[in-house]
Image (cartoon, rainbow, N blue to C red):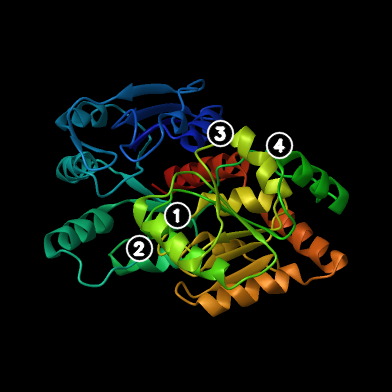
Amino acid sequence: MRVLFLTNVPSPYRVDFFNEIGKAVDLTVVFERENAKSRNAEWISDNFKNFKYFFLKGIKYGDDGLISFKVKKFLKKDFDIIMFGNYHTPTSIIAARYCIKKKIPYALSVDGIFKHDNENKFKLKMKKKIFSQAEFFVTSGNYSVDVIKYYGGSNCYIYPFTSVHDNYVLNKPISIEEKQKLKNELNLKNNLILFVGQTIARKGIDILFKVFSNLSNCQLLVIGGTLNEEYQKLKRELAIDVDVIPFLKSKELEKYYLASDVFVLPTREDQWGLVINEALAKGLPVVSSTMCLSCYEMIKDNGYMVEVEDIDGYVKAINNIFNLSAEKYSLLQENAIKVAKEYTIEKMAERHVAIFKEVISKR
């Protein structure tokens, strides 16, 4: 089976997925860019093993897109499956329009998608055209399926979207003693709240600070960036002490997931939220906003979902976790791991191969 995948940048989880699926199919990956403007260079992977890869040349567009007509030369080759990982970059639009014109079947990989009111009319028209002509979709959950159908898409297949391998997921929760040992090693306090991600408005950093200002006897650890002047000012106004660590690679980050007591993601919009996968894989209970689509699939007796601006809701959920008995907290940890085991790169690749075979058999 020959598969072509067009995507934006070689992010680590994408490259890991391509390496895994490349064990089962003859895979070619075409990347639009070598890096995203907003991402730390260390976030990018070049661990290309089990697939052929190419980088397009063209004009950089936005954070991680490209304007390139050179993509067309790849679409002329005889692939059994042509999959676009984007539908909004100029190059992906060029590719989709070319496939429509030449009657070449293509599919869309949609990690997660929200419906937005007051969309640009031209972009909305283009999106509906591309969605309605796609042969099939692979996506991460029923929420996204409903939005895909709204935009005119059909024939949707759900897969477990993730960034973690089987061996990253714990077999069982670490003990209270092990967690305390890690806290001591890292000079961290009890009732440790962890946030991992970019320190930007979309991630709800201001919401997180306001929530923390309404809690007591706990520590907030933010990993993944630095605080700009706006957030420094807010921190001073709220009179809170926040510990901030810049970007860490997965291996370095792992021990902070293990040492923490609750993971909080008050995002204003995350089309999936892979940090939820990472936290659950380490048995860490989660409190997240309802604007993180992974929560609709993965929050199952292992945390709470809260409306995005509901400060009191976050405070109540976090305190509920802090106040659990050791036995009940351990049950949350076990449930977190149980869900995470169903969301691994190995299962993600296996599901894609099964979908591709089913689609080909139905032609």
Looking at the image, which is closer to me, 105 or 21? 21
| Circle 2 residues within 10 Å: few <14, some 14–19, many ≥20 | many
Residue type beneath disc 4: Asn
- Residue under label 3, please give it: 249
Please report whichever mark, 4 or 2, sits nearer to the chain's N-terminal start.
2
In the image, is 232 to the left or to the right of 281? left
CA distance separating discs 3 and 4: 17 Å
Instruction: Residue 316: give x, y in percent of width and height.
Output: 63, 77
Closer to viewer: mark 3 or mark 4: 3
CA distance separating discs 4 and 1: 24 Å
Q: Are marks 2 and 1 in contact (CB under 8 Å)?
A: yes
Please report whichever mark, 3 or 2, sits nearer to the chain's N-terminal start.
2
Please report whichever mark, 2 or 1, sits nearer to the chain's N-terminal start.
1
- Residue under label 1, please give it: 139
Residue type beneath disc 3: Lys
- Residue under label 2, please give it: 148
Q: Quadrant of residue 131?
A: bottom left
Closer to viewer: mark 3 or mark 2: 3
Please report whichever mark, 4 or 1, sits nearer to the chain's N-terminal start.
1
Q: Residue at x 34, y 47 (%)?
A: 107
